[in-house]
Image: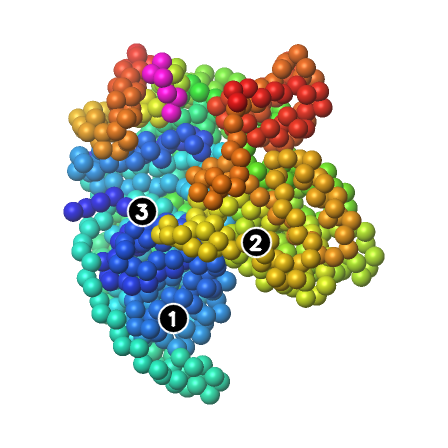
Amino acid sequence: MDTRSILLVGVGGQGTILAGKILSAGLVEAGYDVKVSEIHGMSQRGGSVSTQIRFGKKVHSPVVGRGQADILVAFETMEALRYLEFLKPEGKVVVNNYQIPSAPILMGKAHYPQGIMETLKEKANTSVIEAAEIAQELGNMKVMNMVLLGALVKAMNLTDIDWEKVITASVREEFVDINIKAFNRGMEEFVLAEA
Amino acid sequence: MKKLLTGNEAVALGAYEAGVHFAAAYPGTPSTEILENIANYEEIISEWSPNEKVAFEAALGASIAGARSLAAMKHVGLNVAADPLFTTGYTGINGGMVVVVADDPGLHSSQNEQDNRYYAKHAKIAMVEPSNSQEAKDMVKAALEISENFDTLVMMRMTTRVCHSKSLVEVGERKEVPLKPYVKDLSKYYVAPAVAKQLHVKVEERLKKLEDFSNETDLNYIEWNDKKIGVISSGVAYEYAKEVFGDNASYLKLGFTHPLPSKKIKEFAQQVQSLYIVEELEPYIEEHVRALGIDCIGKDKIPNIWELNPEIVARSLLEETAPTIEYDKSQVVNRPPTLCAGCPHRGFFYGLKKRKNVMITGDIGCYTLGGADPLRAMDTTICMGASISLGHGAKKVFDKYNKDMKVVSVIGDSTFFHTGINSLIDVVYNKSNTITCILDNRVTGMTGHQDHPGTGYTLTGEETEMISIPDLVKAIGIKHVRTVNPLKLNELNEAFDWAFNLDEPVVIISKYPCVLKKWSQYDKEEFEPLEGKCEVDVEKCIGCRMCVNTGCPAIYFIKEDRKVKIDPVQCVGCELCMQVCPTKAIDKVGE
């Protein structure tokens, strides 16, 4: 198979790195060659963050450029628009309906852009995920990342991998159940969003 | 067994398997995790050093004592360590020694985009460049063997996308390597001019031998495919080239990049129709190829600014543009990094920015963000330690030419230990009257919470002497020293009033732990923790935005109703907003 490229984007502190870690562990377990690229350091202080995951028979580059990602998973709504140019025109967008205003918006110097979801839907195959709502229902906002991971796994049709096993091995024991629940809800939510 | 590792983790594993005995570093993105991971192996003596020069020299000392040693640093760290680097080029080593340097193409977390490959050429040492994590691990071992076989320091040059990308690595066992005997050898390690003169002759002989090795080693290999296009590449750029050309081109893959393999390059170039040099940043390989009289396509097409990726390589060389989705990107608002909610630096800069006729010289760390909107309380940021010495020079000129300007130099605790001390000695010695503010948040913050000589703990978590900053600056000769809590604006402003009225050098230590820091026992004994959350009483809020102007990411100005809201998830209850609110509209809840 050809190498497939996943782009996870969000805001520092949203758990993109853990989601990427679980995703890549599952892909390795399934026998794929995998490369992951992350950015650490200054951008983590509330800045825009991205994790790239590429998998296939043999992966060379750990990163892709504009127009090269198969799927864009945005943990924050505006970040989807920031990185949309990295998506292949036939690629998929999984976007969290969750807004984090950036510094210029907080200070009243700019408005949070309106109509992002409409733009995304018009331009690409987009599924909107209510990850915040689901995470709140489950009782821990931090598991938003697992909801989105579940949606991503469904969107990429990677459901043959034993994700429960991977999640169990990746998070602290007391959080295993809630993370698995969030992951499963994310898979269901994707089906609903697509339909 | 194969594991998915970052390049930095792979370097640590390589050091372990190759029997390294000693490793030292100063943290710096993207190199930090190398020593953090080496520290997990108790077989290796591993240390944070106060700066990169010290780390390098400690590793050299270990090598001369007979050990296999490693020093790690980010690209600009090698500038600090350049002095011993060049002379080590002359002396050579005893136990194998490798210096790992991590360049940052794209300036993800750096002040410049220098290409450190030129250092290897300049210092006349050997260099290896891994393209992925497996190579990073293997090349540590190869580098140590080259180091010992040729009596040379070896530089391993990495880049952000090698350091922070994960790929699969075969995990092996540690092979213990006995220490080499320590032999006193004045003709090698005592570089008085007469000795160094002879050493330079040896260096040139060694370079010839290393070039022969470069032509023979499997680290530089050819992959023959279609011969219409030939690609010479190294580092992560090789992976990009493979992604773009696949089997439609032949490759000369360079893993050993100083000295470059002239013979192999000529052989390869002769057999291909068009020769492409794919490299990130400067035309280091290309200049060599052109000096051999070989025509090639390189930096005339591929940019030498910012990092590459497969799309840029394809666009530059093949004029192939991947189709993208067209949309209006102008509505996307910037998301610059900010000081965290509850960051103790915020109060400090908020207090400082009110001062008039002041030049604020800054330094490298999280607090560099004090120069960004809305605080903008910083005039310069150059390099580690420069705040104090640069401020000193400026103040001397202001005073001599009767300019009514105060100078405040702002530096973090770890940066002060790094190179700020020397600069503060300059202030005292040359009788300046700058105000030096040491923002002591009890940790090396930006790089992800590493200990330093002021925290009381070593890299491996052992308790150690906690160097007292007030005692240290007093010992240097600073007579006016005051420690303040930056979360208390009154205390801070009073200290500024005091300092601005003195005509001698002053040090203000702004001391409170980083809001993200896991408090040590010492922190728990010394500081009051933050409790509760701040909440706005909308009746009292007049929408003046004083609190918004602190730049706290938990505070949100709602334009429509001209009121402020505080996000209870982000707020940690530092109370800075309460102190700046003119109508006392912010209360504390949940204490």
Q: Which comes before the other along the chain, label 1 or label 2? A: 1
* Mark nearer the viewer, 1 or 2: 2
Chain part drawn in magenta: A137-142
Distance from Cα at disc 3 to Cα at disc 2: 36 Å
Image position of A98 with respect to B330: above or below? above
User: Which residue position is annotated with label 3?
Assistant: B6
**What subunit carries mark 1?**
B
Q: Position of residue B418 (x, y in %)?
A: 52, 57
Q: Residue at x 26, y 58 (%)?
A: B43
User: Badge 2: few (under 14), some or many (20 or more) residues near its Cα, within 10 Å?
Assistant: many
- Which residue is more in the foreground, B3 or B318? B3
Q: Which of label 3 and label 2 is nearer to you?
A: 2
Q: In the picture, residue B45 is in which quadrant? A: bottom left
User: Looking at the image, is A35 positioned above or below residue B261?
Assistant: above
Q: As shown in the figure, which amino acid type bears the numbered disc 3?
A: Thr
Q: What is the x, y in percent for residue B195? A: 43, 85
Residue B31 part of the magenta segment: no
In the picture of the structure, the residue carrying the numbered disc 2 is B469
Q: Residue furthest right?
A: B402
Instruction: Indicate the secondary structure of the residue bearing disc 3.
Output: strand
Relative to B216, B458 lies left or right: right
Q: Main secondary structure of the magenta part?
A: helix
Type of the residue with mark 1 = Gly
Residue B284 picture quarter: bottom left
Of all chains, the one bearing label 2 is B
Q: Is residue A140 magenta?
A: yes
Q: Quote the CA–CA distance across marks 3 and 1.
A: 29 Å
At label 2, which amino acid type do we have? Ile
Q: Tell me, for residue B61, which label it has, or none.
A: 1
